[in-house]
Image (spheres, rainbow, N blue to C red):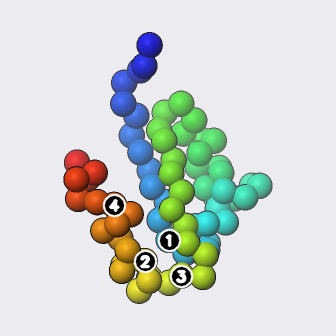
Amino acid sequence: MVGPRRPQFVLFGSSIVKQSFGNGGWGAILADTYARKADIMLRGYGGWNSRNALQIIDQVFPKAMIQ
């Protein structure tokens, strides 16, 4: 049986976000804290900056996905 839909957190950003799921990283701590309560998704792009990220944000988060 599948439970109710859980909230989702998307970590979106540069290499700082990408590396957050490393051992003891803030993304890993967040995922552990919200285990079985929310889905934590990583969208970190190493070597990128905000300008690069804004160019692809509509591909990463299509308007049809956003509720």
* Label 1: few (<14), some (14–19) or many (≥20) C-alpha neighbours in 10 Å: many
CA gap, disc 3 and disc 1:
8 Å
Outermost residue toward the right in this view? 23
Comes first in the chain, label 4 or label 1? 1
Tags 2 and 1 in contact by the CB under 8 Å rule?
yes
Dot 1: element: strand
Amino acid at pointer 3: Trp
Residue ID for mark 1: 13
CA gap, disc 4 and disc 3:
17 Å
Q: In the drawing, what numbered circle is on residue 53?
A: 2
Tags 3 and 2 in contact by the CB under 8 Å rule?
yes
Comes first in the chain, label 4 or label 3? 3
* Label 4: few (<14), some (14–19) or many (≥20) C-alpha neighbours in 10 Å: few
Tag nearer the camera, 4 or 1: 4
Q: In the drawing, what numbered circle is on residue 61?
A: 4
Residue 33 image point, x, y percent:
59, 41
